[in-house]
Image (spheres, grey):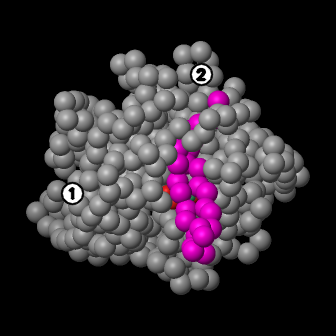
């Protein structure tokens, strides 16, 4: 099969380049054509940040997975590179699934991914295997290792499921390579396996780093594990999770486990568990460490449950979140937009102290490419308002509503009237930690998305908004008087490079 499939994808991309501009986000990564899901191989390489992604160029639906490829210097402007991996080997013919990447000390770019391959047994039943494979490259062209897979069934601990075994995330530490990989254990629920290697080629099993014990979902996909602010953080994306209180929604969710890494037993001693993102559209995030020591995360700003339908006449399906800087304070994960975004702010509009009671529009406050921060507090320090609302992406018929109930300490986002003609889940409510009705909200909008950062990053929530981009009104509404400070910038980013 040689490289035919890769060449086919690359020449298709070249054809699609001319059609790719259209109605797209400005600074959220999208593919030149077709479908994307998880971010993959998000890591520095030769001074730039590379991002690969689950990719099916030929349709707006999931198909046999390739790895698409892009890079950036500042997380805002992306340059597309040719498709990096195609499913062209016996061991990955049913898909090159998610994985990680690393710059090796000899300058080569290492990719590690899950090869999916099924075969029909003598009894007529189809058996599918997921194994871990590697490829080496120069930042643009990659050769799959001739002795793939490097981690297969024989390196699985007793009782492991050989089908649900995927999404290696790799890193280098203390002269060794490590990988965390999602799996299902004997109890049929998710767990994360830790592997190590001296050369990134010959691997051995170390431990079960953390297990779900049937608590959070059926299978844990797309793990990432890193040290941050003297804690260890494990991020997983559970499949088929039941709602757990107001913190975790049902379906494909995302969970962050914070704790201490026991270096002797190689297990994570769990101290706190929380959702990573509280919105409707977020899954399978990955992180990297920047040159200046920041832990930056990017996620798929969509979700299996919300990605079944697309708008007619679009040339792409799926986009990534804005990369976010992470920190841990008091055993809680905080996230804020990367500071590189500040360089793209223009046309500041500022209101230092306004009163809102009932409905209000503010001169200069509108737009679909914006970075807006609003600080709200009760106008009367001893009283409490009942509800404060922001309407965005608004015209005479459409809007998306963000409302805050200070009594319940809950934010609800409702895009039901956003204009999308399919009955996907449209409303999400999540608990916040505001004191006495004081709320700080930063909103980033990039045409088809809304990302909220609550109370200096204590929570983040991501939403796709399908409303036509000329619906750019913003208004406020309060039940009970509030005092507010509003600061808004237009975000000016010239469209992505090819
Ligand atoms: C997560 C996931 C991964 C898998 C990939 C396939 O969204 O299901 O587990 O590697 O997507 O595209």
Horizontal arrangement in the rendering, residue 495 relative to residue 253 (left or right): right
> Which of the two residues, 182 or 19, is positioned nearer the viewer here?
182
The answer to whether the residue bearing label 2 lies less than 8 angstroms from the nearest atom of ligand 1 is no
Residue corresponding to mark 2: 47
What residue sits 67% from the left and 64% below the top?
A: 63
Q: Which residue is mark 1?
A: 433
- How packed is label 1: few (under 14 Cα within 10 Å), some, or many (20 or more)? some
Instruction: Answer left or right for 321 relative to 71.
Output: left
| Tag in front: 1 or 2 | 2
Closest to the observer, 196 or 20: 196
Q: Residue at x 53, y 48 (%)?
A: 131
Give the magenta-colored segment's residue range: 112-136
Q: Position of residue 470 (x, y in %)?
A: 67, 67
Q: CA distance from mark 1 to mark 2?
A: 38 Å
Percent position (x, y) of residue 366? 55, 60
Neighbourhood count class around disc 2 (C-alpha, 10 Å): few under 14, some 14–19, many 20 upward: few
């Amino acid at each position: 099969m040689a490289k035919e499939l890769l060449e086919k994808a690359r020449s298709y991309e070249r054809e699609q380049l001319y059609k790719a501009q259209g109605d797209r986000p400005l600074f959220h990564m999208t593919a030149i054509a077709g479908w994307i899901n998880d971010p993959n191989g998000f890591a520095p390489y030769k001074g730039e940040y590379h991002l690969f992604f689950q990719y099916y160029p030929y349709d707006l639906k999931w198909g046999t997975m390739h790895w698409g490829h892009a890079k950036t210097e500042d997380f805002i402007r992306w340059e597309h590179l040719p498709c990096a991996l195609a499913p062209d080997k016996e061991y990955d013919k049913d898909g090159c699934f998610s994985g990680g990447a690393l710059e090796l000390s000899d300058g080569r770019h290492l990719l590690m991914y899950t090869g999916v391959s099924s075969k029909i047994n003598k009894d007529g039943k189809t058996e599918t295997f997921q194994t871990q494979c590697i490829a080496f490259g120069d930042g643009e062209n990659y050769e799959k290792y001739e002795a793939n897979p490097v981690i297969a069934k024989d390196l699985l601990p007793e009782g492991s499921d050989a089908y649900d075994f995927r999404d290696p995330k790799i890193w280098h530490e203390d002269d060794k390579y490590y990988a965390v990989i999602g799996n299902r254990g004997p109890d049929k629920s998710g767990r994360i396996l830790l592997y190590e290697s001296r050369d990134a080629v010959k691997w051995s099993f170390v431990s079960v780093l953390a297990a779900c014990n049937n608590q959070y979902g059926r299978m844990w996909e797309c793990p990432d594990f890193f040290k941050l602010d003297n804690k260890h953080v494990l991020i997983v994306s559970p499949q088929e999770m039941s709602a757990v209180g107001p913190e975790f929604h049902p379906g494909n969710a995302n969970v962050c486990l914070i704790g201490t890494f026991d270096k002797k037993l190689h297990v994570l001693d769990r101290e706190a568990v929380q959702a990573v993102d509280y919105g409707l559209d977020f899954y399978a995030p990955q992180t990297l460490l920047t040159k200046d020591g920041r832990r930056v995360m990017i996620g798929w700003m969509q979700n299996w449950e919300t990605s079944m339908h697309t708008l007619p006449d679009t040339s792409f399906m799926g986009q990534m979140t804005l990369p976010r800087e992470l920190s841990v304070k008091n055993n809680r994960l905080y996230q804020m937009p990367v500071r590189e975004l500040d360089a793209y702010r223009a046309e500041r509009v500022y209101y230092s102290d306004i009163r809102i009671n009932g409905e209000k529009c503010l001169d200069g406050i509108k737009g679909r490419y914006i970075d807006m921060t609003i600080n709200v507090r009760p106008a009367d320090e001893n009283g409490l308002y009942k509800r404060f609302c922001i309407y965005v992406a608004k015209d005479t018929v459409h809007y998306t509503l963000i409302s805050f109930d200070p009594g319940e300490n809950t934010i609800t986002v409702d895009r039901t009237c956003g204009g999308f003609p399919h009955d996907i889940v449209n409303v999400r409510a999540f608990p916040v930690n505001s004191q006495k009705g004081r709320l700080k909200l930063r909103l980033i909008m990039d045409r088809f998305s809304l990302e909220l950062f609550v109370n200096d990053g204590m929570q983040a929530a991501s939403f796709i908004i399908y409303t036509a981009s000329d619906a750019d009104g913003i208004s406020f509404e309060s039940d009970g008087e509030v005092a507010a400070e509003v600061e808004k910038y237009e975000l000016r980013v010239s469209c992505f490079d090819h």
